[in-house]
Image (cartoon, grey):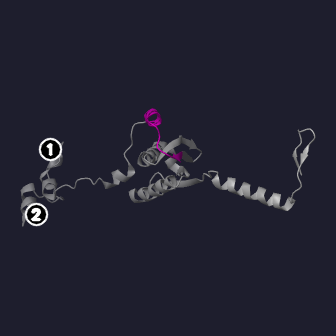
Amino acid sequence: MEVADQADPPVCRIMDYGKFKYEASQRAKESRKKATHVLVKEMKYRPKIGPGDFDTKTRKVEEFLGNGSKVKVTIMFRGREMQHPELGRRILDRVAETVDHVGRVEVFPKQDGRNMIMVLVPGQGTRRQREAAADHRDAAAVVPPVADPVDAAAVVPPVADPVDAAAVVPPVADPVDAAPTPTETPTETSEDTQTETRE
């Protein structure tokens, strides 16, 4: 086998070619082991995701980032949800804030057809990168905030007290309408109602 073809005269070595091929394949295998192989994992969210599902999926994102994988976070929109991309952006921002101790944003949220995509990479972001991410979020937050569907469901409207409701008598516009006609029965007064409810 020729070793140095540029030399004068060229240098050659007599060797076992099968052994040479085997050693070359072993060196190639070792170099592949040492190379960093980055996997891209994907986690899919929906705009109406519940708090329990959000926490579970976000824990898995943290685990993927902790193992050294990139994570592609996707928000899938359906139907009328496409009219409110700010809900998806809010979820992606919450994911980024939750995992900022193990990962940082590589590709900021962007709309891709019916999906909104963000890519996270392992490693904490520098202070400058975190400030850039905050500026990017502030610039995207031009749309006024919409009530979070999860929080809106938790708010229960107050129920009127039946005693107070009976005490309120609607105003009468015309005195002719206020007098009972012969076919109508007179309505109970608020005092009668209050005594009945107390008994």
In the rendered view, tell whether residue 95 sits above or below residue 26.
above
Left or right, residue 90 beside residue 176: right
Question: Residue at the bottom extreme?
Answer: 199
Mark closest to the chain's N terminus, 1 or 2: 1
Q: Nearer the viewer, residue 147 or 43?
A: 43
Name the image quarter holding the C terminus.
bottom left
Q: Which mark is residue 197?
A: 2
Packing grade of label 1 (10 A; few <14, some 14-19, many >=20) is: few
* One can see residue 142 in this view: no
Residue at label 1?
Answer: 175
Q: Residue at x 85, y 61 (%)?
A: 18
- Left or right: 194, with 66 as reference point: left
Label 2: which secondary element:
helix
Q: Mark 1, mark 2: which one is toward the viewer?
A: 2
Residue 78 among those drawn in magenta? no
Query: Residue 121, how many percent across, how many down?
Result: 53, 46
Cα–Cα span, label 1 and label 2? 29 Å
Residue 20, given in percent of the width and then of the height, sits at 82, 57
Q: Position of residue 82 (x, y in %)?
A: 52, 46
**Residue in the image at 56% along x and 42% along y:** 111
The part of the chain drawn in magenta is 119-141
Neighbour tally class for label 2: few under 14, some 14-19, many 20 plus, Cα within 10 Å: few
Q: Quadrant of residue 153?
A: bottom left
| Residue 30: % across, % down | 68, 56
Q: Amino acid at mark 1?
A: Pro
Task: Indicate the secondary structure of the residue bearing disc 1.
Answer: helix
